[in-house]
Amino acid sequence: MSNTAPLDVASVNGTGGSGGITEAYTSLPGWARWMITAALGILVLSIVEEFAGTSLLTSDVTSSAMLRWSIPILLAGLGGLFSERSGVVNIGLEGMMILGTWAGAWGALEFGSPWWGLLTGFIGGALGGLLHAIATVQFGVDQIVSGVAINILAPGLARYLSERVFGEMQGGSVSQSPRVRSAGSFTIPGVSDVLETIKDWGIFFISDVASVLLGFVTDMRWFTLLALLIVPLSAFVLTRTKFGLRVRICGENPSAGESLGVGIYRHKYVAVMISGALAGLAGAYIVIELSGLYRGGQTVGRGFIGLAALIFGNWRAVGILVGSLLFSYPFGLALIDFDASGSGVATRALLLVIAIALYATAVYLWRTGGDDAPPPEIDAAAYDTPTSSYMKMVATLGGKGGGLTLLAFGLGTVALVWYLLTESAAAWLPNTMPYVLVLLVLVFAAQRLRPPKAAGVPYRRGDH
């Protein structure tokens, strides 16, 4: 028997140390990875707060605002999840959200209850989803073209209906409705008291974590809780039920599903209508909980950010939740930071956070040899329509080639220099930063994307 010790593969391949840590991290369950990532994020915010002289980055008021602003993005992303899992790309989420804003305001005013507004917003978005399903599933219209058409149609239809309905109401006009009331809020007793106590200890990082969590359990809207409960419900439906399995078959291999007796058209219809309904619910939330009235143009692109959260979350419900919180953080911070004095100090500090994140990304790509990994192979001949070109773009986001390490380092340096040369953030930065974060995350964080194989691919009965 040989006395030779077994080889340490990590040491032979030079992947010990940080490589071992990376492998241990990736082997953890998804919920554990997200929790560790969130803790590291709060740690970075705590460190930056010490340098920037602000406490708003981890304030409970900021995290509470972040949570509120994340809900429309979350619901839109979950809507896109159902649609794309069934194989139908839904660019029309923005338009369906607009239909939800108008229908939500109308229902709340007509029936005198914000809960009726949620229901009518749900139905209004579902009707937009039905229109998208009829066009794409039944008649084979290109999915991108259909989605863009809904995005164009919805604002015009909402304005026409506003003129006919809200224009006749006291306090309403062609572009806005009378005010509607909120569905109410609550505070989790006991938990909030404990977190408030830990926050008051003033211990570095520990008190900051408590402060962030405090914003999640204090003065929470009932509608926010409902939206958060939809996350595990969506994950359960898509992964643990017969309906969810059949929807995923539609998005992965509809021909095989049809051969097994799955009603491909029926499941696509239902999934796309659920997609529209969730987007409509997002619109109703904007009206009832964020603005208190319907106003034209108030969705401001959140449907598209929801699509970015869907891609960031790798077509998984929990990932979409994390993405929606990340993308809404600058909105929430700006609400608190740009008060009457308009200081912008905390928003300026966010530039330093972005610089640190980009430098960490550059180090990670350099250590893992990310630039050497080829992009996924794409059948170029198959991409000759707007929808297929969009899916090609999504698929190639997973490639690490093209000098991403250098790009991350360069952008990190730009953010750092910008931070050092300014004393406060410009007033336009908070509104721009969420979209910049969307681009940065999609470029650098979406390295292992696995979109549904048949997403965006037109399907006709009998195709094999």
Image (cartoon, rainbow, N blue to C red):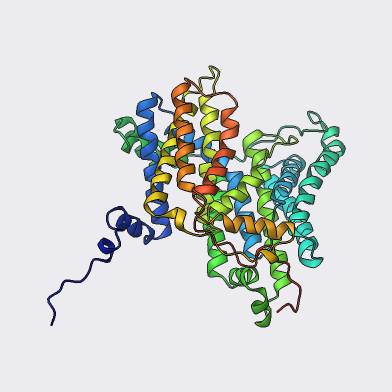
Name the residue rendered at 37%, 62% in the picture. 27
Q: Nearer the viewer, residue 244 or 360?
A: 360
Instruction: Give the image location of residue 170, x and y in percent.
Output: 81, 29
Q: Residue at x 69, y 42 (%)?
A: 113
Instruction: Give coordinates of residue 309: x percent, y percent.
Output: 57, 49
Instruction: Mark yes or no: residue 249 visible.
Output: yes
Pinpoint residue 15: horizontal percent, then vertical percent.
Answer: 31, 58
**In which quarter of the view is residue 43 placed?**
top left
271 left or right, relative to 429: right
Q: Residue at x 32, y 37 (%)?
A: 205
Q: Residue furthest top?
A: 341
In the picture, which quadrant includes the C terminus? bottom right
Q: Is residue 328 above or below residue 251?
A: above
Closest to the observer: 423 or 110? 423
Locate residue 48, reporting x and y percent: 38, 31
Q: Is residue 61 left or right of residue 310?
A: left
